[in-house]
Image (cartoon, rainbow, N blue to C red):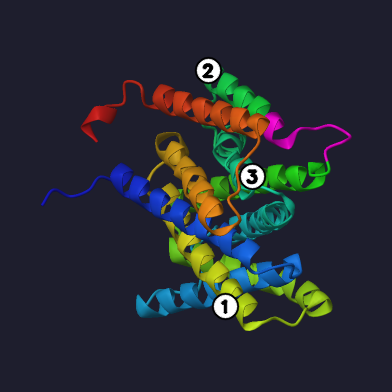
Amino acid sequence: MKKLSNKTKGIICILFSALCFSGMSSFINLSGDLPIAQKVFFRNLVAFFIAAGALIKNHESFKPVKGALPFHFLRSAIGLLGVYGNFYATTHMTHTADAAMLNKLSPFFTLIFSALFLKEKVKPKQALAILGAFIGSMFVIKPTLSNVEQLPSLAGLIGGLGAGAAYTCVRHLGNIGENSRFTVFHFSAFSIALTLPFFIISYKPMTSKEFICLLLVGVCAAGGQFGITAAYTYAPSREISVYDYSNIVFVAIEGYLFLGHQIPDILSIVGYITICIMAIWMFIYNNKGTGLQKQ
């Protein structure tokens, strides 16, 4: 059997991650009107135990590699900001797919931050794709004084920015040889510690259904986090990030089936199409002449 290339492994991991994160979005909504901190706490609590179990099972160290700790804290702080933004948008926006699409701006932010901090050059056509994606996001956000969803939309945009910055840190951690399972463990532990006070202050009693949904939020989040961390460890964002947009398809299907037949408005659909076209164009441009057909 032919051994899979790192790029193929990265694609498989990012598709798995997209499916898991779509499930997370659905269960966030199905868990009702519980406080955001309560949802974020459970999201990371489950991931913490899964990551710790994975480290123990594989007899791996609970210590970071040399020089990695500052980047773990940076990744965790920015990543937690992104999670809060995404959860707020997912909970308060009428259409879950809108929140998911704003979060999918993360590959563009990853490209920007990779250029700034990892010295990966952004070429003119890539910059144009980033501008096009931003314009597309405006169709989803609809920045007008009459838009009651403007705050959740901006939170979703911050969620995408935080995720993009966090994935840049993940890419760097992979480059210096950090274990992806420890990266997930550190982020989960950090997030639990910072979220715990807000969880206690705002705690709201849960029904059995809400409790199960929050556990499933955590399970899906852990699967998505392991998948995305492994994906960007196997391959750079320019080669695989476009496959993360499968998440929008998964979210739209789940929203239609389980969340009251959600159908985005025409402006949101225009935004989706614009962002996806920019993502596909950037993907093709980045892989031009790299032997993509041989992968």
Left-right relation of 204 to 281: right
Q: Is residue 188 above or below residue 165?
A: below
Sequence-earlier tag: 2 or 1:
2
**Residue drawn 71% across the image and 30% down it:** 138
Q: Amino acid at mark 1?
A: Ile
Dot 3 alpha-carbon crowd within 10 angstroms: few under 14, some 14 to 19, many 20 or more: many
**Residue drawn 47% across the image and 59% down it:** 20
Residue 160, which numbered label? Answer: 3
* Image coordinates for residue 226, horizontal then vertical, percent: 45, 61
Dividing the image into 4 quarters, which one contains the C terminus?
Answer: top left
Mark 3 and mark 1: span between their CA atoms?
27 Å
Q: Amino acid at mark 3?
A: Gly
Pointer 2 residue: 125
Pointer 1 residue: 212
Q: Amino acid at mark 2?
A: Lys
Mark 3 and mark 2: span between their CA atoms?
21 Å
Q: State the residue lying farthest toward the left.
A: 1
Q: Secondary structure at mark 3?
A: helix
- Return the residue nearer the eye: 267 or 10: 267
Residue 98, which numbered label? Answer: none
The nearer-to-camera label among 3 and 1 is 1
**Principal secondary structure, stretch drawn in magenta:** loop
The residues colored magenta run: 138-147
Q: Secondary structure at mark 2?
A: helix
Left-right relation of 123 to 289: right
Dot 2 alpha-carbon crowd within 10 angstroms: few under 14, some 14 to 19, many 20 or more: few
Sequence-earlier tag: 3 or 2:
2
**Visible residue check, residue 177:** no
Q: Is residue 196 above or below residue 36?
A: below
Asked if the magenta segment contains residue 142, the reply would be yes
Q: State the residue lying farthest toward the right.
A: 145
